Image: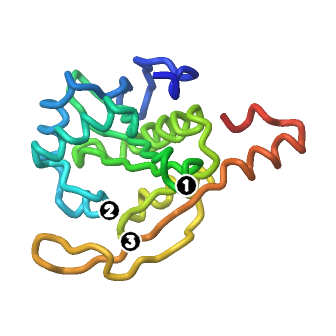
């Protein structure tokens, strides 16, 4: 994949409770990702456009990866998928310079650094793709995720009230965070620090 040539996989990262391996998701990962997604609480997936716990949705996801519209990186521990970070972009839209980061983490590995490590890796992957702006969406009660992305320089840009419905029909607000990578790069270059981003 030419868009990820600057990042090599697999990649190993040490976290609070051991280590993680990151690798790019492909067709061979479909069954493992489906098993991972089916264990996620539905509330954790409300910001995603579709329920990735459904086999047909996951098959469509794999096709989008093969087409090059989506790049997903998996976090694994002991061979099991514990997280997934995805960068989505549409080069044929009015916003080919914008990428959306989507990320989900297994409930049994929260609080030990998996979310932070995966968000850092997904952010670095997005930067290696040359995107100028990044956005991330999540429900407003996902305060841990919001804090992680704010730590990477993302800032709240929009609040979408009653934007998604859970399985019981209850509506939830979505917060949209954005990061103007091009502007930050320009500022760092002005200070003589271009390598600090990317």
State the CA–CA distance, disc 2 to disc 3: 7 Å
Q: Is residue 19 visible?
A: no
Tell me if label 1 and label 3 are in contact, CB under 8 Å: no
Between 104 and 5, the one nearer to me in the picture: 5
Q: Is residue 169 left or right of residue 74?
A: left
Q: Which residue is mark 3?
A: 174
Location of residue 62 with respect to 184 vertically, above or below: above
**x, y percent for residue 109:** 28, 42
Q: Earlier in the sequence, mark 1 or mark 2?
A: 2
Q: Residue at x 28, y 59 (%)?
A: 49
Label count reads 3
**SS under mark 1:** loop
Q: Is residue 23 visible?
A: yes
State the CA–CA distance, disc 1 to disc 2: 20 Å
Q: Residue at x 82, y 49 (%)?
A: 187
Q: Which residue is mark 1?
A: 95
Q: Residue at x 17, y 31 (%)?
A: 30
Q: Label 3: few (<14), some or many (≥20) within 10 Å?
A: many
Instruction: Choose mark 1 or mark 3, whichever is in front.
Output: 1
Quarter of the figure that contains the N terminus:
top left
Between 134 and 82, the one nearer to me in the picture: 134
């Amino acid at each position: 994949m030419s868009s990820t040539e600057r990042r090599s996989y697999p990649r190993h990262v040490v976290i609070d409770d051991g280590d993680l391996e990151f690798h790019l998701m492909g067709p061979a990962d479909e069954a493992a990702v489906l098993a991972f997604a089916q264990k996620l609480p539905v509330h954790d997936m409300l910001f995603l456009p579709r329920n990735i716990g459904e086999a047909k949705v996951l098959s469509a996801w794999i096709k989008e990866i093969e087409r090059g519209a989506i790049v997903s990186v998996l976090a694994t521990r002991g061979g099991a998928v514990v997280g997934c970070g995805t960068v989505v972009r549409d080069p044929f839209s009015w916003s080919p310079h914008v990428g959306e980061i989507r990320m989900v983490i297994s409930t049994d590995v929260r609080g030990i650094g998996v979310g932070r490590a995966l968000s850092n890796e997904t952010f670095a992957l997005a930067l290696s793709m040359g995107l100028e702006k990044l956005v991330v969406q999540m429900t407003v009660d996902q305060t841990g995720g919001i804090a992680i992305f704010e730590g990477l320089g993302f800032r709240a840009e929009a609040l979408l009230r009653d934007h998604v419905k859970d399985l019981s029909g209850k509506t939830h607000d979505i917060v949209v965070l954005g990061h103007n990578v091009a502007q930050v790069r320009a500022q760092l270059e002005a200070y003589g620090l271009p390598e600090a981003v990317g």
